[in-house]
């Protein structure tokens, strides 16, 4: 559990599955402690993003991201909707619904976990729902952390939101709605070493993706198919009709001796 929350902490976000609980009672106890911690914060304006794995005996596990609001109430409890194939073989997928919460200072907040951001169609919900700040707890491994950060940063641009990413064994940082990387830092697997970012409250940016989806990609794909069909068709089938233009001499018309000749 996060030991303290200071008056300067607007958002305290854990990396993915920072804790493990095995029963509903353990889960309820941990969330109650989180609520009490937030409610006792000095400025009464701090959010706490709690992440954990719920592993009940004989059942598939849940990968959970719970957001505690400044008043100590549960803003959302989200279950990862896209577990990593093979790596999370024993983890069940949650509903494909992006959670949101409205705050007067931060605007509309949304959240998703790690691999969820690899699914651009799922993250379109952030743009459609008007999310201005997207929270992403993550856990990466090996040498893919840089590629994963870069790929997930595209979701901020596509949906016009600021992305706050907290990752263990990967890269944490902040990406603006225009794709500007404001912070980027390699963060390991030691929860006792916090990383502090200053996140500017950038207004949400309107983007065509949030309204038309990826229709432009589909149009380009359709045009490519048509272009390939034109290339593969026999030359005789691709031959366009030729229009012959005739030129008429006005002087000849005046003398009633008009004669048209090919241009």
Image: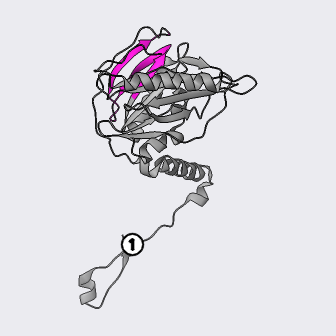
Question: Going 60% across and 21% down the picture, which residue do you hit?
Answer: 26
Front one among 233 and 124: 124
How many numbered discs sit on the rendered protein? 1
Kindly give the residue lying farthest to the right in the view shown: 58
In the image, residue 139 sits, relative to residue 176, either above or below, namely above
In the image, residue 253 sits, relative to residue 2, either above or below, namely below
Q: Secondary structure at mark 1?
A: loop
Mark 1 neighbour density, 10 Å: few (under 14) some (14–19) many (20 or more)? few
Image quadrant assignment for residue 127: top left
Question: Going 54% across and 34% down the picture, which residue do you hit?
Answer: 78
Whole-percent x and y of residue 31?
51, 25
Question: Going 36% across and 18% down the picture, which residue do you hit?
Answer: 5
Q: Which residue is mark 1?
A: 245
The region drawn magenta spans 164-189
| Whether residue 253 can be seen here | yes
Task: Give the main secondary structure of the magenta stretch.
Answer: strand
Question: Going 44% across and 8% down the picture, which residue do you hit?
Answer: 192
Protein image colouring = one colour
Q: Quadrant of the C terminus?
A: bottom left
| Whether residue 84 can be seen here | no
In the image, residue 257 sits, relative to residue 53, either above or below, namely below
Whole-percent x and y of residue 84?
62, 26
Q: Is residue 182 rendered to the left or right of residue 129?
A: left
Q: Is residue 50 magenta?
A: no
Whole-percent x and y of residue 131?
39, 41
In the image, residue 211 sits, relative to residue 181, either above or below, namely below
Front one among 75 and 234: 75
Image quadrant assignment for residue 82: top right
Whole-percent x and y of residue 17?
55, 20
């Amino acid at each position: 559990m996060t030991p303290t929350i200071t008056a300067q902490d607007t958002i305290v976000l854990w990396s993915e599955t920072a804790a493990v609980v095995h029963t509903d009672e353990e889960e309820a106890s941990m969330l109650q402690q989180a609520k009490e911690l937030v409610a006792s914060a000095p400025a009464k304006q701090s959010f706490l993003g709690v992440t954990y794995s719920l592993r009940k005996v004989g059942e598939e596990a849940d990968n959970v991201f719970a957001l505690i609001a400044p008043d100590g109430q549960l803003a959302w409890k989200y279950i990862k909707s896209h577990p990593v194939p093979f790596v999370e073989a024993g983890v069940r997928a949650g509903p494909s619904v992006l959670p949101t919460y409205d705050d007067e200072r931060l605007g509309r907040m949304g959240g998703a976990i790690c691999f969820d951001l690899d699914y651009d169609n799922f993250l379109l919900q952030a743009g459609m729902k008007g999310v201005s700040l997207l929270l992403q707890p993550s856990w990466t491994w090996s040498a893919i952390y840089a590629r994963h950060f870069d790929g997930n940063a595209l979701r901020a641009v596509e949906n016009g939101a600021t992305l706050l990413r907290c990752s263990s064994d990967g890269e944490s940082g902040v990406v603006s709605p225009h794709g500007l990387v404001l912070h980027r830092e390699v963060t390991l697997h030691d929860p006792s070493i916090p990383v502090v970012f200053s996140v500017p409250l950038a207004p949400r940016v309107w983007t065509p993706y949030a309204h038309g989806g990826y229709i432009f990609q589909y149009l380009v794909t359709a045009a490519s198919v048509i272009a390939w069909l034109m290339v593969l068709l026999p030359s005789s089938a691709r031959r366009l009709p030729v229009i012959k233009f005739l030129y008429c001499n006005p002087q000849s018309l005046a003398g009633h001796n008009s004669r048209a000749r090919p241009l």
